Amino acid sequence: MLVLMFSLNSCCNGPLYAQEVPAGSELMEIVRMEEYYRNTASLRFDVQVTFADSAVPATILETVTGSYTIDYDKYHIMLDSTEFVQGLQYNLVIFHEDKVISVGVKQPYTDVLRVPLLDSLFRLSQVLSLQVTHLNDTTRRLVATFIPTAQYSGYSIDYDLRNYVVRKINYYIKIPASPSAGNTSLITVNFTN
């Protein structure tokens, strides 16, 4: 008994981290993130979206800022001068600068992460690997790598491992950021609040 107490004491004096995500359970991490955003009432957060050449990510070519308010399937999103509103029956997109309003039928708000990683056909035909790693004691990173012919070349999500709140998403997309740029663009979405 004394040996067991000594062993526990000696191994637990340093910093403690959450258990690593076992290989094969990456999809459950995605489900938990999506469930948080789908099932949290009166959720509000701000975003900053930046667009750059992936070869020179520090040189930002364009920035869009916005705010999201989501209450189950109702939402209000403001991205620069474009507003998205969904109520109980209708969906509106308002382009303030162009003075255009688009009205449609209510749409389910189901795709928080914008890449269909939970779609098995998409994964089989496009994704080479999914991996979750710890960045620190509160943050995990999910990384997806894609086949050479896919639209994406890479995708990563940094999220809080305690509550699955997304902090940052990086999309590496095969479109040039500018005529002189390489062939992959980096879109970064930073979440605050």
Image (spheres, rainbow, N blue to C red):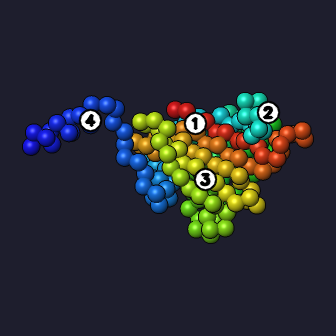
Q: Which residue is mark 1?
A: 191
Residue 37: percent from left, percent from top: 50, 48
The part of the image, by quadrant, that contains residue 169 is top right
Q: Secondary structure at mark 4?
A: loop
Residue at the disc numbered 4: 12
Say which label, 1 or 3, has the lower sequence index.
Answer: 3
Question: Type of residue at label 1?
Answer: Phe
Residue 16 located left or right of residue 56: left
Viewer-nearest of discs 1 and 3: 3
Q: Which dot, 3 or 2, sits closer to the camera? A: 3
| Residue beneath the point at 53% across and 44% down | 141
Sequence-first disc among 3 and 2: 2
Disc 4 + disc 3, Cβ < 8 Å: no
Q: Circle 2 is placed at which residue position?
A: 61
Instruction: Tell me the kind of residue under disc 4.
Output: Cys
Of marks 1 and 2, the one in the foreground: 2
Within 10 angstroms of label 3, few (less than 14), some, or many (20 or more) residues? many
Q: Nearer the viewer, residue 102 or 133?
A: 133
Q: Residues within 10 Å of mark 1 (few under 14, many from 20)?
A: some
Q: Amino acid at mark 3?
A: Ala
Mark 4 and mark 2: span between their CA atoms? 47 Å
Q: Amino acid at mark 2?
A: Leu
Q: Position of residue 5 (x, y in %)?
A: 14, 39
